Image (cartoon, rainbow, N blue to C red):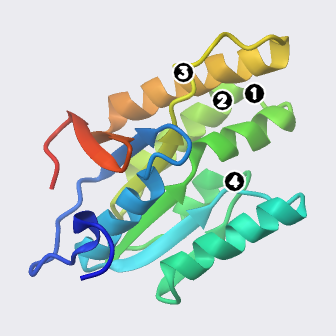
């Protein structure tokens, strides 16, 4: 068998809760874990991508992620309007938002009102007819950044993660590829 145990397909579909938060550090395995949850759901899979390809390295990362997922995902690119993208999702689908951190970065660099943007996103998540898995980075376990923009971002990301975790039915931290339930039970 190839891959990790979390890649194995369950014999019966997994019923995803309305909102799952998967959080971890860079290269922790959080996206792979989130993708596995959606594969196990038995639902049509929708991937809402928040990354923007500003350079060759990011374009290569995006190509790699698309290849790894395979062709059986519907991809919606929504680097700025997550709420609008969620409004296009229907019953019988399951959604992966990857990731909240890049969305927040995009909105912050656009000088958006982050409190209003967060409120709009949370409202869209509450009414989405499909289960949603949101991937986000934990950025607060590092040193205090040396510049004001980086500190503002770290603080905004921490607040967003707290809001998402408060709404989530299942919150999972992923470290070294291993999931740990913060709220709810691992499937």
Q: Residue furthest right?
A: 55
Of callouts 4 and 3, which one flags the residue occurring earlier in the amino acid sequence? Answer: 4
Q: Is residue 6 left or right of residue 142?
A: left
Measured Cα–Cα span from mark 1 to mark 2: 5 Å
Q: Closer to the camera: disc 2 or disc 3? A: 3
Dot 2: within a 10 Å radius of its alpha carbon, few (fewer than 14), some, or many (20 or more) residues?
few
Q: Residue furthest bottom?
A: 71
Q: Which residue is mark 3?
A: 159
Dot 4: within a 10 Å radius of its alpha carbon, few (fewer than 14), some, or many (20 or more) residues?
some
Of callouts 1 and 3, which one flags the residue occurring earlier in the amino acid sequence? Answer: 1
- Report x, y in % for residue 31: 46, 57
Q: Which residue is mark 4?
A: 81
Measured Cα–Cα span from mark 4 to mark 2: 13 Å
Q: Residue furthest left?
A: 11
Q: Which residue is mark 2?
A: 116
Determine whether 149 is above or below 9 in the image.
above
Position of the N terminus, as image quadrant, is bottom left
Marker disc for residue 113: 1
Of callouts 4 and 1, which one flags the residue occurring earlier in the amino acid sequence? Answer: 4
Which residue is located at x 78 percent, y 32 percent?
A: 108
User: Is there CB contact under 8 Å for labels 2 and 3?
Assistant: no
């Amino acid at each position: 068998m190839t891959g990790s145990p979390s890649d194995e397909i369950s014999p019966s579909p997994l019923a995803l809760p309305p909102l799952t938060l998967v959080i971890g550090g860079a290269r922790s395995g959080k996206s792979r874990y989130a993708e596995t949850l959606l594969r196990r759901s038995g639902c049509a899979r929708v991937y809402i991508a928040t990354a923007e390809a500003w350079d060759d390295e990011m374009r290569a990362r995006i190509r790699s992620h698309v290849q790894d997922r395979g062709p059986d995902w519907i991809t919606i690119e929504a680097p700025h309007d997550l709420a609008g993208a969620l409004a296009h999702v229907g019953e019988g689908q399951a959604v992966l938002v990857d990731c909240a951190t890049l969305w927040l970065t995009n909105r912050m660099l656009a000088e958006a009102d982050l409190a209003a943007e967060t409120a709009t996103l949370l409202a869209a998540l509450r009414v989405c007819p499909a289960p949603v898995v949101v991937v986000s980075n934990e950025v607060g376990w590092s040193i205090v950044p040396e510049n004001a923009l980086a500190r503002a971002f770290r603080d905004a990301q921490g607040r967003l993660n707290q809001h998402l975790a408060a709404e989530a039915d299942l919150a999972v931290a992923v470290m070294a590829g291993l999931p740990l339930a913060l709220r709810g039970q691992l499937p």
